[in-house]
Every structure is written in structure tokens, then in C-alpha cells.
Image (spheres, rainbow, N blue to C red):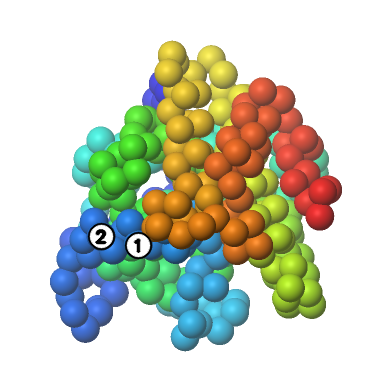
Amino acid sequence: MRLDDFDSSINVQDQRGGGGFPFGGGGKVGCGSIVIALIAAVVFGVDPMQMLGSMQQGQVSAPVEQQGGASLAESCSVNEFSKESCNALSSLNKTWGPLFQQANIPFEAPTLVFYSQNGRSGCGAAQSAMGPFYCPSDSGIYIDTDFYTEMDRQMGAGGDFARVYVMAHEYGHHIQSLLGTSAKVRQLQQSSPSQANRYSVALELQADCYAGVWAGRNRDRIEAGDIEEGMRAAHQIGDDTLMKAAGRRPVEDAFTHGSAAQRMQWLRKGIETADEDQCDTFAAL
């Protein structure tokens, strides 16, 4: 996907090279840990509140600061994936901001936070094994760009569109936070624990659809093979695909993010319609 939208208006923070969050082991998180985390479905938009048992819901940590005095341009040019992520963030802001303005809804752009191995977020610790995630407490999209290499090698989900789909999905969770959707879902999960997974699936599929809406509204930037990369990535992160990879029989009641077919379906719907109003994944609940 041709993205060259980088500008100085984006919010970027960089924890790389500053030590990040101090963990006792201090060792590098390896490929195996990342794969285990993927299979455990703690990637592509999982609510960090569910992952970090020591966290109290809604707790906000100290603000994350730029590490090492790195400038915005320096942070976005550390490597190819950093630049790509910054370009995607700029494009996402330029796509979603006007839509909120048209709807007379207050809009605040999220912050892209780069970290390496270990870091900290408004939702607590950040670890590479979590994969990219969105923290609603500080409106941060947290990424260790090494994840993209593992996504390609371990999951067969490489390509630039697959990577920006990750960004767009996490941005979709920011949209849900701004609209109050995420808060409503947490309330419903608390009041109906037996339906908690179904609500989680709907939330994740909607974020997939929102990612597709962004791509659909930037169709002129899409290149040959991009859609196929996105569909392959969506398939590889389906709950049933991950369960099979872990040697488990897929059980729909245990799904938290949706099946491969569902994730592909809603990503495709977003791309084809380019209409956020078509992303009502909760209608079938």
C-alpha cells in the first residue's frame, strides 16, 4: 500500500533504548513466546485490562515520555517498519478525523508508542509477547516492530498491507473507545459473563471492519496483492486457525476474536463498502 502521509502532526512516543519497563528476568522475549501469545489470542486488539491481572480497570500509569531525546523524525525512521507505522498513523488520522467532524463527535488522535521487548503503558506493562495492542487508558497504540518479522516468519502473514492492517485494527479499537462502544461492551460482559466471549468477538470483528473502511476510503493507495495479504493475515489470526496451530480442536464458545472466515468477511466488508455504518457486528448477538 502506497503510504507517504507522514507529517509532524502525528503523536508518537518512543521507549526504545530507554530501558522500558524493568522486568526481573531482563531477557529477550523469543519467537516461541510470541507464538504462544498469538495462540492464546492476546494479539490484534485484545483489551490489556483482561491480560494484566494486577491492573485495576481504568487505572492510568504515569505518562509515557520520549526516550533518549529522540525527535519525531528519528523515531519514525529507526527502521522500515517504524516509518511504515508512522505513515499509516498519519493516513488513519486524516481518514477518521473528518468522519468524526462530519458527525459532530469530538475526535482525539491516538498516540503511537514504540517500544522494544519491554515497555510501559497506561494499562501497565507492555511486553513483546503481547503483540501490538491498544490501551484505552492513555489512547496509545503500542508496537514492538520486531513483531512484524515474527508475523511473517511464524504465521506466514507478511507484506506491507498485512502490517498496516495491524495498525488499522488497533486504530479501530481507538474509534470504539471514542464512541463509547468499548465501555458498553465491558459493562455487558460484566452483567452477562456467559456471553462475554461473544461480545469480545463482536468488538474484534468491528475493529477488523473499521480497518477495512480505512483501506476502502484510501483505495487509490492500494496496490496489486494488498487485499490478498490482508485476507491471508486475517485468516492466520482467526481463533480456529490459532487453535489448530496449537493442536487444539476449535471450539466456537472459546473464541474471543472470531474465526478466520469471520475476520476475513468483516475486513472485506469494510474494504468494499468503505462505510463505517456497515460495521454493526453486534446486530447478530
The amino acid type found where label 1 is placed reads: Ile
Name the residue nearer the viewer: 64 or 128: 128
Image coords of residue 235 (percent x, y): 50, 39
Q: Residue furthest left?
A: 27
Residue 215 visible in the snapshot: yes
Question: Position of 30 compared to 211: left or right?
Answer: left
Image coords of residue 160 (percent x, y): 37, 30
Q: Residues within 10 Å of mark 1 (few under 14, many from 20)?
A: some
Tag 2 near tag 1, CB within 8 Å: yes
Name the residue nearer the viewer: 119 or 77: 119
Q: Quadrant of residue 210?
A: top right
**Quadrant location of the C terminus in the rendered image:** bottom right
Q: Mark 2 sits on what residue?
A: 32
Image coords of residue 277 (percent x, y): 78, 37
Q: Is residue 235 above or below residue 14?
A: above
The amino acid type found where label 2 is placed reads: Gly
Image coords of residue 43 (percent x, y): 45, 56
Q: Look at the numbered disc 2 and give the secondary structure of its residue.
A: helix
Q: Is residue 276 above or below residue 190?
A: above
Residue at 43 percent of width and 28 percent of height: 229
Name the residue nearer the viewer: 112 or 143: 143
Distance in Å between CA atoms under marks 2 and 1: 6 Å
Q: Residues within 10 Å of mark 2 (few under 14, many from 20)?
A: few
Question: Position of 244 compared to 101: left or right?
Answer: left
State the mark number for residue 36: 1
Residue 18 visible in the snapshot: no
